[in-house]
Image (cartoon, grey):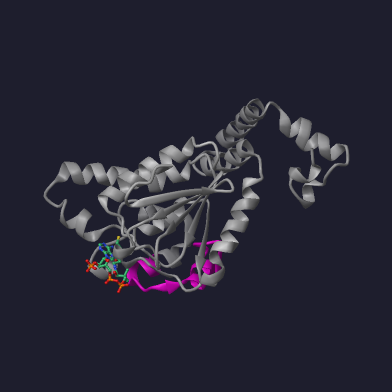
Amino acid sequence: MAESSTVTVSIENAIATVTLNRPHKRNAMSPTLHVEMAEVLEKLRYEPTSRVVVITGAGESFCAGMDLKQFFMELENNPPEFDRIYRIATEWRYRTLRYYPKPTIAMVNGYCFGGAFSIVEGCDLAFAAKEATFGLSEINFKHYPGGSVSKSMANLLRPRDALFYAMTGRPFKGDRAKEIGFINEAYPLADLKREVMELASEIATKDPDALAACKDGYKFSLEMSSEAAMNYSAAKSDQLTLRQKGSWRSEGIGDFLQGKYRPGLGGHEKAGG
Ligand code: COA
């Protein structure tokens, strides 16, 4: 895939690694980065060789949040452009990632502040270096977790933790991020990439339509009544059957019933053939 200036993409073994690439600015999200990230996610959505998307940062930082200079200062007197970038910035982190058809993993390799929390929350899974530093730093510059960040926090964190970090701006490390449920696991930085790529490879072996249904079933049902969710789930199952041409029955269950593999102990690839 063609690379943009502030975001790079590499695809290897069915895993697309998307790297925020402004290391000299700690990968703060400039207006250009937001536009390019939206374009990259749109291209990867339909890109056939990648099955899982991993988002990380170049250098020692994951993402230092919004580019405070280019977004808040330089666009202060340009409301139409501010609104345009604001919409793109919230769109890709909050909506595009949330309802993305491919599994997404945040790999937090270093600093993760403010607006970057919405990237982590928007991804399906998140892993961080134990050494990484997180912070809802907005309060420290007399602001608050604006844009999509407050809602992202409300989605994921317990009220006590969300408000504690939003009101103090205190930084915390990877282990604490795991403890409060913001990430799945923290690893030593030296092991982070290997661990994440191993997991991404495992997920890449699963049926892509079934993975998309996993995500939709969970994420859309959060916002539905129970009755609507049951109905949606039944319809989703029919959609999955259609898209897979019924292979979850014929191969998934069929190969189990023929004794070729045990779904309780591993994936269908163990059935061979
Ligand atoms: N917006 C704009 N520029 C930023 C930035 C941000 N969020 N974060 C870092 N930068 C820039 C710095 O201004 C500096 O630019 P310069 O070299 O032109 O002076 C460069 O990135 C390096 O930053 P520096 O502070 O020197 O690096 P550091 O490693 O000592 O500290 C941070 C890194 C991330 C702890 C610190 O830069 C910081 O606190 N940034 C703000 C984080 C924040 O509050 N983000 C929330 C935004 S919603």
Quadrant (top left/top right/bottom left/bottom right) for the C terminus: top right
Find residue 74 and report its image quarter: bottom left
Magenta residues, as a range? 163-187
Image-based side of 199 in relation to 35, left or right:
right
Where residue 38 sits in the image (x, y, percent)?
A: 36, 43
Image-based side of 216 in relation to 139, left or right:
right
Residue ID at (31%, 59%) = 28
Where in the image, quadrant-wise, is ligand 1 located? Answer: bottom left
Where residue 183 sits in the image (x, y, percent)?
A: 52, 62
Residue ID at (48%, 41%) = 99
Q: Is residue 133 magenta?
A: no
Residue ID at (34%, 60%) = 27
Judge whether residue 39 can be spotted in this image.
Answer: yes
Judge whether residue 154 can be spotted in this image.
Answer: no
Quadrant (top left/top right/bottom left/bottom right) for the N terminus: top left
Instruction: Pick out the residue farthest to the front.
Output: 2
Image-based side of 127 in relation to 144, left or right:
right
Where residue 151 sits in the image (x, y, percent)?
A: 39, 52
